[in-house]
Image (cartoon, helix red, strand yellow):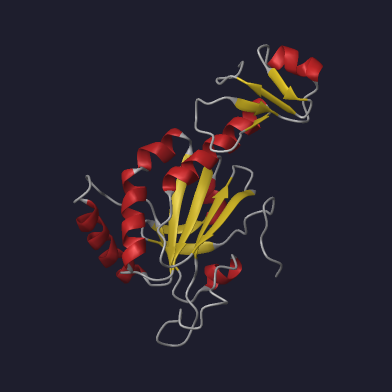
């Protein structure tokens, strides 16, 4: 199948998770979702990542975002790993993994989402089957893929950045704006190029024209 791209519909699937069986699109419902993969349970970088997501659950919930992990092991292994994640994470702050983790020992879903490592010949399990790369998919309520990120094995993901992108996407969908380099929530935003100057006068009364193609406005924008 062709590689998934921004704008692709996220493939639907059924799976067993640490919180019971799901049908992915039904599980997302009317929410946004973050699907993030791991090569295997009991791996060091991923252990720290899952703990961080558990501690940031309120941040995702405030944005109407559901999170779900996937790792190439079975449910028994996942349940044991969660105990480690909570224990290690508690050294930073209270950590309690409450989001589901998909069991994908046969790599069925990893293959569906083109997550298998096709580059590193050493990134395989005892049977020689490639592990998943550490990928992130941000999916909107229409089940459209809005962001993909793939991280190398040695580098932990930055969930502040993932939340920052979600903020940008959600604000852009609502207000017809885009966000500039290094934008943080509360900073000035860019008026979408598809908005005419006449429209901008109504939508963004205080907008500034830096260049004919670059107009900025304060945040929050007019409701």
Location of residue 212 with respect to 77 vertically, above or below: above
Q: Quadrant of residue 61?
A: top left
Residue 36 is situated, as x and y percent measured from the top left of the image, at 47, 57
In the displayed structure, 124 sits above or below 191; it is below
Q: Is residue 169 left or right of residue 51?
A: right
Above or below, 221 against 39 in this view is above
The C terminus - image quarter? top right
Does the rendering let one see residue 98?
A: no
Of 118 and 53, which appears nearest the observer?
118
Residue found at the very far front of the displayed protein: 210
Q: Residue at x 48, y 36 (%)?
A: 64
Q: Is residue 177 left or right of residue 137?
A: right
Residue positioned 53% across, 38% down in the render = 182
Q: Which quadrant of the rendered structure holds the N terminus?
A: bottom right
Q: Is residue 28 left or right of residue 211?
A: left
**Residue 217, x across and y down, in percent:** 63, 20
Give the answer, above or below, for where 69 lies relative to 182: below
Residue 152 appears in the rendering: yes
Numbered marks: total: 0
Q: Position of residue 154 (x, y in %)?
A: 41, 66
Which residue is most to the bottom?
127
Q: Position of residue 152 (x, y in %)?
A: 47, 65
Query: Residue at the location (61% across, 15% down)?
Result: 222
Between residue 211 and residue 135, name the one nearer to us.
211
């Amino acid at each position: 199948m062709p590689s998934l791209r921004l704008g692709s519909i996220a493939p639907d699937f059924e799976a067993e998770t640490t919180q019971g069986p799901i049908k992915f699109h039904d599980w997302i419902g009317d929410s946004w979702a973050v699907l993030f993969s791991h090569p295997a349970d009991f791996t060091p970088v991923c252990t720290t990542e899952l703990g961080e997501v558990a501690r940031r659950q309120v941040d995702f919930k405030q944005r109407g975002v559901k999170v779900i992990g996937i790792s190439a092991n079975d449910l028994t292994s996942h349940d044991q790993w969660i105990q480690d994640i909570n224990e290690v994470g508690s050294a930073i702050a209270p950590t309690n993994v409450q989001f589901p983790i998909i069991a994908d020992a046969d790599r069925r879903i990893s293959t569906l989402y083109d997550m298998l490592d096709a580059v590193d010949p050493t990134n395989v399990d005892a049977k020689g089957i490639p592990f998943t790369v550490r990928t992130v998919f941000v999916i909107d309520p229409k089940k459209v893929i809005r962001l993909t990120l793939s991280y190398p094995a040695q580098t932990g993901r930055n969930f502040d950045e993932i939340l920052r992108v979600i903020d940008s996407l959600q604000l852009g969908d609502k207000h017809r704006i885009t966000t500039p380099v290094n934008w943080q929530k509360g900073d000035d935003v860019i008026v979408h190029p598809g908005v005419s100057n006449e429209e901008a006068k109504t939508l963004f009364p205080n907008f500034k024209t830096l260049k004919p193609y670059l107009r900025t406005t304060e945040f929050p924008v007019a409701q």
